Image (spheres, grey):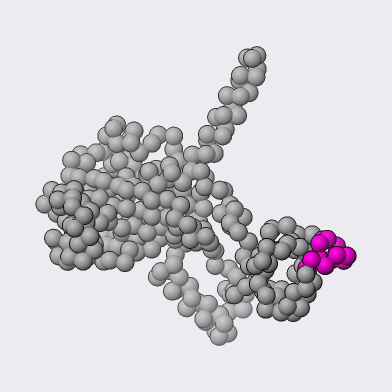
């Protein structure tokens, strides 16, 4: 093989690797071995994500803010995802939309339907239900979801005495509901000696974002490092996701608003595959030619139907 071919092959591989892993080349494990805790950085965004609180409010026992706010700081600073707000920010936005629909906003405010960006993924931060410091039995793991107080916190992933935290990050595709990633994170008080990349704890801005208690308490710092461990691993794992999550998923179903024919040809003439009734649900394949869409019915029949005869299923 010539040197030119080898050089060209090397360049192709380098480009492929650069786009396969959007995070910085150095893994979270290598950074930890080097003695540095740092939020990973991405060269491009993986997709749009919403962060939700876990069901069980464990953080109040330690006078900490919601881990949702903590993870949002990671997301914003890493630039690995476009972040959309589905909690307080969305509620405030809906108030503005209510004012707009009532005619109370000034002309040209440009607030209305069809402007909210869709989330591709939902990320939920939680605790691992079983902790080795709590005995490690299946019984204690199961009890972690029910026991309250500090004893429950020990079983549920945080040990206040030994200052350890075991956490979990789960990412779900909102279109398919497939869980595309699940990463664990661990930290203990010995990790507090790690240097904080980019400055001290106060420079991370957790308190300003509503994640209070994570910067200035020892258990809060341990929980932060555990979530950072999980988030760094998560970013590396999600590097192989499609660049356009919407296009990569199945097309949204449609419902016929009137009777129509399913044709074998995209011209909308000739052989009729079958006759369709109003109210039937069809599944677009993604192929279109003008107003004609290629669709499948629930029996597996496939053909072309005019888009004038259906609407997006609600």
Position of 111 with respect to 161 (left or right) is right
State yes or no: residue 265 in magenta: yes
Q: Is residue 135 visible?
A: yes
| Viewport quadrant of the N terminus | top right
Question: In what quadrant of the picture does the C terminus appear?
Answer: bottom right
Q: Nearer the viewer, residue 212 or 57?
A: 57
Q: How many marks?
A: 0
Closer to us: 276 or 39: 276
Quick one: which residue is furthest to the right in this view? 270
Vertical arrangement, residue 94 with respect to residue 208, above or below: below
Residue 253 location, x and y as percent? 63, 67
Q: Residue at x 31, y 58 (%)?
A: 126
Which segment did they paint magenta? 262-273
Direction top: furthest residue: 2
- Judged left or right of residue 199, residue 241 is right
Position of residue 310 measured from the top left corner of the image (x, y, whole percent): 71, 73
Residue at (79% x, 66% y) in the render: 273
Residue 159 locus on image (x, y percent): 16, 53
Residue 163 within the magenta-colored segment of the rendering: no
On the image, the x and y values in percent for residue 242 come to: 56, 48
Find residue 229 and report its image quarter.
top left
The answer to whether residue 207 is visible is no
Q: Residue furthest left?
A: 161
**Residue for point 59% across, 26% down:** 11
Q: Camera-side residue: 203 or 217?
A: 217
The overriding secondary structure of the stretch rendered in magenta is loop
The image quarter in which residue 4 lies: top right
Which residue is found at the position 56% from the left and 29% from the top? 13
């Amino acid at each position: 093989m010539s040197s030119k071919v080898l050089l060209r092959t090397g360049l192709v591989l380098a480009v492929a690797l650069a786009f396969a892993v959007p995070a910085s080349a150095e893994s979270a494990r290598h950074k930890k071995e080097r003695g540095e805790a740092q939020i990973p950085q991405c060269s491009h965004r993986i997709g749009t994500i919403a962060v939700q609180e876990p069901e069980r409010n464990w953080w109040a026992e330690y006078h900490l803010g919601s881990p949702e706010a903590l993870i949002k700081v990671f997301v914003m600073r890493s630039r690995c995802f476009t972040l959309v707000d589905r909690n307080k920010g969305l509620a405030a936005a809906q108030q503005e939309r209510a004012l707009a629909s009532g005619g109370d906003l000034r002309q040209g405010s440009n607030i209305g339907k069809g402007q909210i960006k869709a989330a591709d993924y939902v990320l939920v931060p939680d605790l691992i239900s079983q902790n080795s410091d709590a005995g490690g039995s299946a019984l204690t793991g199961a009890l972690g979801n029910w026991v309250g107080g500090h004893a429950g916190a020990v079983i549920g992933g945080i040990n206040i005495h030994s200052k350890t935290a075991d956490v979990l990050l789960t990412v779900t595709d909102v279109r398919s509901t497939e869980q595309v990633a699940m990463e664990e994170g661990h930290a203990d008080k010995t990790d507090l000696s790690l240097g904080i990349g980019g400055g001290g704890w106060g420079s991370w801005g957790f308190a300003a974002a509503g994640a209070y208690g994570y910067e200035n308490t020892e258990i809060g710092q341990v929980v932060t490092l555990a979530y950072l461990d999980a988030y760094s691993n998560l970013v590396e794992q999600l590097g192989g996701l499609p660049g356009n999550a919407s296009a990569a998923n199945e097309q949204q179903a449609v419902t016929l608003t009137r009777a129509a024919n399913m044709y074998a040809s995209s011209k909308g003439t000739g052989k009729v595959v079958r006759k369709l009734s109003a109210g039937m649900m069809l599944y677009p394949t993604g192929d279109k030619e003008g107003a004609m869409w290629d669709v499948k019915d629930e029996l597996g029949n496939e053909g072309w139907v005019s888009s004038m005869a259906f609407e997006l299923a609600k």
